[in-house]
Image (cartoon, grey):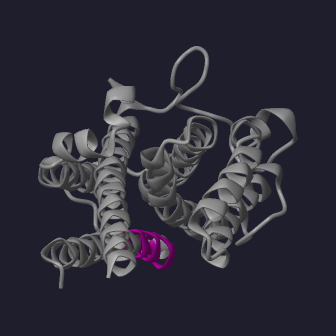
């Protein structure tokens, strides 16, 4: 059964989870963006543009 | 095998699909981890705040593990001058810093209701804060020097100096009187946590580990591509 009622600790539990999701999602987004940019730069360099 | 992969081209060929496979594996582990974290019973002492442990402990483990990877890669970069090792070290630092920041922030959110303080200058907390400064120092040093080779060498030396802090973080709770609880999973005699709380913790930790390796490989590949593109442009500019 899911326990989603954090009672008096809600103000500590949810920010901890929210922050974790935000930072990890940010890492994934940043990693993908940099990879795409580097790939595009390499393609341009290989084509001699 | 590791030395075989030190060749950037062989590494690029071997890790072509790593992002997709690792991404799927990490997503499955993390979704299972979140489900287990919120179906576990509350702890008899910590109550619902035990759910902070499922994001705090893996982040803290990763902060130390990633630093060990950063130190290892820096060693290979410094001693054997492997370009790929330097790319790996550079790629690992921001990941470790992010895990370290999460460990500090989520620890603080747990400390307030359980210890009555957001922060205490305790051996464990302070040594983890110093580890965070080593990550920041490493990244700042790399960014401050224009000559990439010099930046890589200076940062690698800093990373190796910081390695001494990793065992200090781990043993700080045993060596000094600490408010922070002692190790309850990686200890002689086995874990002391109830299985119902240990399982979500371990699955979340595996999810964090898988996510780290996936992002590390993708970022190292990115670094190889960036260096290659720059080298090609320089060659062309020199030939023109």
Q: Position of residue B146 (x, y in %)?
A: 62, 76
Identity of the residue drawn at 39% across and 27% down: B3
- Residue B64 visible in the snapshot: yes
Identity of the residue drawn at 76% across and 40% down: B164
B37 lies left or right of B72: left
Furthest-bottom residue in view?
A49
In terms of secondary structure, what is the magenta stretch mainly? helix
Seen in the picture, residue B69 relative to B89 is either above or below; the reply is: above
Q: Nearer the viewer, residue B21 or B217?
A: B217
Magenta span has B230? no
B152 lies left or right of A3: right
Residue B149, quarter of picture: bottom right
**Label total for image:** 0
What range is drawn magenta here? A10-21
Q: Position of residue B35 (x, y in %)?
A: 21, 54
Tell me the quadrant of the picture where the C terminus of chain B can be found: bottom left
Q: Position of residue B141 (x, y in %)?
A: 68, 69
Furthest-top residue in view?
B189
Residue B27, quarter of picture: bottom left
Q: Nearer the viewer, residue B132 or B198?
A: B132
Furthest-front residue in view?
B240
Tell me the quadrant of the picture where the N terminus of chain B can be found: top left
- Residue B47 visible in the snapshot: no
């Amino acid at each position: 059964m899911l326990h989603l009622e954090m009672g008096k600790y809600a103000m500590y539990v949810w920010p901890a989870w929210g922050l974790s999701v935000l930072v990890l999602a940010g890492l994934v987004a940043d990693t993908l963006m940099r990879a795409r940019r580097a790939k595009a730069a390499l393609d341009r360099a290989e084509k001699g543009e | 095998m590791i030395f075989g992969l030190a060749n950037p081209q062989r590494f690029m060929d071997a890790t072509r699909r790593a992002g997709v496979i690792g991404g799927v594996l990490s997503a499955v582990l993390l979704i299972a981890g979140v489900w287990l974290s919120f179906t576990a019973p509350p702890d008899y002492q910590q109550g619902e705040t035990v759910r902070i442990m499922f994001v705090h402990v893996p982040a803290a483990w990763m902060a130390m593990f990633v630093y060990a990877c950063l130190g290892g890669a820096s060693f290979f970069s410094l001693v054997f001058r492997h370009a790929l090792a330097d790319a790996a070290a550079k790629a690992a630092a921001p990941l470790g810093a992010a895990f370290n920041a999460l460990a500090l922030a989520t620890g603080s959110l747990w400390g307030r209701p359980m210890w009555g303080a957001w922060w205490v200058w305790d051996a464990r907390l302070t040594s983890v804060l110093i580890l965070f400064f080593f990550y920041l120092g490493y990244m700042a040093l790399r960014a401050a020097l224009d000559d990439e080779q010099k930046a890589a060498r200076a940062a690698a030396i800093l990373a190796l100096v910081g390695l001494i802090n990793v065992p200090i973080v781990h043993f700080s709770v045993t060596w000094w009187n600490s408010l922070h609880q002692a190790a309850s999973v990686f200890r002689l005699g086995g874990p002391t946590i109830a299985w119902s709380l240990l399982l979500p913790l371990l699955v979340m930790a595996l999810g964090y580990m898988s996510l780290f390796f996936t992002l590390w490989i993708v970022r190292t590949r990115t670094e190889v591509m960036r260096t290659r593109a720059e080298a090609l442009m320089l060659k062309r500019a020199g030939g023109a």
